[in-house]
Amino acid sequence: MNNAFFRKAVEKTGLSIEILPLEIAWRNAQGMLSANELRRLHRLGELRKKFWLAARWAIKRLGSRRAFDVSPDEIETVCNSTRPCCQMPNGRDYNVSASHDTRYVVAALTPAGTRVGVDVEPIDPRCLRVAARHAPTLPEHPETATRFWSACEAVVKCSGLGLRAVLRSVIPKTTEWGMELGFDDGSVFQVHQIRFDNRIFSVATA
């Protein structure tokens, strides 16, 4: 995927992003797992294993780009939390987020001090109902509604807030790079977005 505008916008935030076909990503992850990752993998159901592996591979690729002498199998992506992580052999940690649908996996990595959340959503007219209720100022269009929903999902991962809390107080605004979500408490999340293969990919930072 080569969208120069999207990549330029993302670079301004200091983060790295990876978007990969799901089938390629999960196969490449096999044989690249640490002992902790293998233990976690064996506890998952068969359906979740493919998605989980794909996310690990995307995160490991991002981590190896930050240190060219580190191979993906040296990077740890299972830490003491429910969120994915990226821990390098030298002990340095990066904040990461990952998401997937049935065809793609997307992951983003950023240095400590910057929060990040990602999401991927197929464009779906059903999102119009959510947008009409929580974002009535936005144009009534399936793509715009999906952008809103995907932005909210990315912000949930970035902020740690629940989806209900986000939808209850969100004030959305479209921007040249995607969407900006403001909240009653004054906090603002920038969400960079791209449309590809009838999907919206979103990256939120704060």
Image (tube, grey):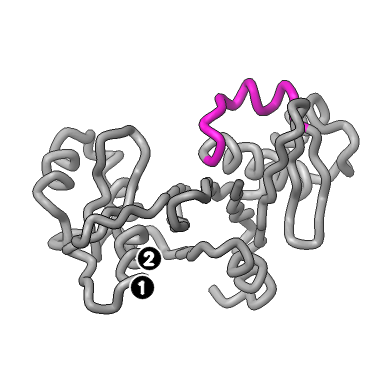
The stretch of residues the image draws in magenta is 158-170
Neighbours of disc 2 within 10 Å: few (<14), some (14-19), many (20+): many
Q: Tell me residue 121's x, y (percent).
A: 58, 47
Q: Residue at x 45, y 65 (%)?
A: 18
The correct choice, above or below, for 159 with respect to 12 in the image is: above
Q: In which quarter of the view is residue 49 placed?
A: top left
Residue 190 at x, y = what percent?
69, 50
- The percent coordinates of residue 161 (x first, y second) are 56, 27
Quadrant in which residue 148 is drawn = top right
Q: How many marks?
A: 2
Q: Residue visible at 56% across and 25% down?
A: 162
Q: Residue at x 66, y 57 (%)?
A: 192
Question: Amino acid under label 1?
Answer: Arg
Residue 41 appearing in the image: yes
Q: Which residue is mark 2?
A: 62
Residue under numbered circle 1:
65
Q: Nearer the viewer, residue 3 or 49?
A: 3
Q: Amino acid at mark 2?
A: Leu
Q: Are marks 2 and 1 in contact (CB under 8 Å)?
A: yes
Residue 19 appears left or right of 196: left
Res 90 → quadrant = bottom left
Magenta run includes residue 93: no
Circle 1: element type? helix
Q: Main secondary structure of the magenta part?
A: helix
Residue 83, position in %: x, y? 37, 38
- Identify the residue at horizontal 23%, vertical 34% (top origin): 45
In this rendering, is residue 38 above or below 130?
below
Vertical position of residue 1 compared to residue 85: above or below: below
Nearest to the observer: residue 115 or residue 77: 115
